[in-house]
Amino acid sequence: MSERLVSAIGKRFPTAVCTTVAATVRIELPLDGVVYRARAQMAPRGRVAVQLPSTDGFELALKWTDRGELQAQSARFDDSCLVETNDVSLANMWLDADARAALLASRYVSGTPEALRKTAPLLRDGTWQHEVRSDEVSAERVDAEESAERIADMLAASLALALRPVRWARWFAPLARALGGEASPRVELGGRPVLRVRRGATDVTVRMLRRLGPGDAGRLRAVIGAHRIGSGGEVLTLISENLPRSAWPPPNDQGACTLRIDDRARALLDAARPSTTIVRRHDVEIMFDGAIADADRLGAAVELAAYWATDHGHDGPYR
């Protein structure tokens, strides 16, 4: 059985390197400059799993119900798809056109052609469920899968979901060029920066995350950060009046001097219009609620983070 599965995966993905451990096939597959590690098995239940970069607690479950009821998706996806998630906006973003097309393609299998026709009909297979959870994409059914080709189908669908952080990173590439920075090859939620920008002696990073702490239920955020150089220890917290209290950051250091906002910082704040601005003793974080595509606002936030990260002596905000 494992030999058939290795053969089917090799035919579908010629660059894949497969090794067999008991009933499980372990796969290493290079795609778009990234090596994806996956596992696949046909029994005792059919299952495929592909590792992801950090998803910061994001969860998504998809199953085919044929109920004619749509959940959190456009009408073009499938009227029999049920999506359950802990972040609807991120689920809509994750299930982009490529992911939806791959999921729909994996759902249909060729039936036996009738005696008087040569074209095999396509039949719906609702036995597989798909998930994004615990930093991996998986597809699973409750019992064994007799067809090695169906396992290869599920691997293709899972890879389309796993490649979403790479496709998302391409969305940041124009922003990186506009800011004179570098974009990461894939987005990690709560992990490595998606953008790095150099301003003088200061490295400014842009990260995407969902949670500010263990008790945070999660919402998509863009965080511009920099390490303070030669800090005098002053702190500052600014929160947009429209931001829900559940999305407020933790309180700043108590007892420290308050950072003064000079004319340059005020102008940059007005241009950026962030959700929150936090200047701690050793770092600066400027946060936007949701992903941001406005190069002008993001650029102003990068300049502000770099400005407040550097001690300007008597000419700047540090007195």
Image: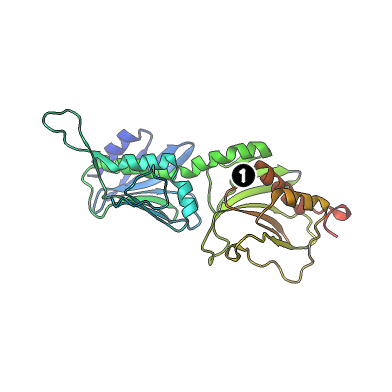
Instruction: Identify the residue at image location x=64%, y=60%.
Output: 242
Question: Compared to 200, does 261 lie above or below?
Answer: below
Q: Nearer the viewer, residue 2 or 271?
A: 271
Residue furthest to the left in view is 115
Question: Compared to 30, does 260 lie above or below?
Answer: below
Q: How is the image coloured?
A: rainbow
For the C terminus, which image quadrant? bottom right
Instruction: Identify the residue at image location x=49%, y=51%.
Output: 90
Residue 234 falls in which quadrant of the image? bottom right
Residue 114 falls in which quadrant of the image? top left
Q: 87 left or right of 79?
A: right
Residue 315, image x, y percentages: 87, 52
Q: Is residue 280 visible?
A: no
Q: Residues within 10 Å of mark 1 (few under 14, many from 20)?
A: many
Question: Compared to 291, does 254 lie above or below?
Answer: below
Residue 108, image x, y percentages: 27, 40
Residue furthest to the right in view is 314
**Please, what is the three-letter code of the amino acid marked with disc 1?**
Leu
Residue furthest to the bottom in view is 255
Q: Nearer the viewer, residue 189 or 104?
A: 104
Residue 79, image x, y percentages: 33, 47
Q: Is residue 269 visible?
A: yes
Q: Which residue is mark 1?
A: 195
Residue 268, image x, y percentages: 75, 49
Instruction: Identify the residue at image location x=15%, y=28%.
Output: 117
Per the image, label 1 sits on a secondary structure element best described as: strand
